[in-house]
Image (tube, grey):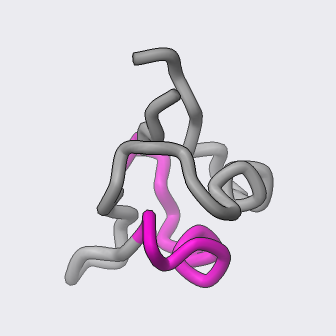
């Protein structure tokens, strides 16, 4: 499974970064950046916490 982020939906809440900083970061505009496209650690928690539902896991 790979991590995908829809930056058009992202509202910059940073919950993903706080939940799994090894996988998610924010750019200068506050939008999500995926640092690693592989599921690891608390990625599923970050996906569940995303208020804009901008994150998802998908088959490779």
Give, as a single range, the part of the protein colored magenta.
6-24
Q: Does 55 appear above or below 57?
A: below
Numbered disc total: 0
Question: Hey, which quadrant is residue 5 in on the image?
Answer: top left
Q: In percent of the image, x 37 and y 74: which residue is there?
A: 25
Q: Main secondary structure of the magenta part?
A: loop
In the image: residue 35, left or right of residue 56: left
User: Is residue 22 inside the magenta stretch?
Assistant: yes
Q: Position of residue 21 (x, y in %)?
A: 49, 78
In the image: residue 33, left or right of residue 4: left
Q: In percent of the image, x 57 and y 32: which residue is there?
A: 57
Question: Hey, which quadrant is residue 22 in on the image?
Answer: bottom left
The furthest residue to the left: 28
User: Is residue 58 inside the magenta stretch?
Assistant: no
Q: Quadrant of the C terminus?
A: top left
Q: Does 22 appear above or below 18?
A: above
Q: In percent of the image, x 58 and y 36: which residue is there?
A: 56
Q: Position of residue 33 (x, y in %)?
A: 32, 62
Question: Hey, which quadrant is residue 40 in on the image?
Answer: bottom right
């Amino acid at each position: 499974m790979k991590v995908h982020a829809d930056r058009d939906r992202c509202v910059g809440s940073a919950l993903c970064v706080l939940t799994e900083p090894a996988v998610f970061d924010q750019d200068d505009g506050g939008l999500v950046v995926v640092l690693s496209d592989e599921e690891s650690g608390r990625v599923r928690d970050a996906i569940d916490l995303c208020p804009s539902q901008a994150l998802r896991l998908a088959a490779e």
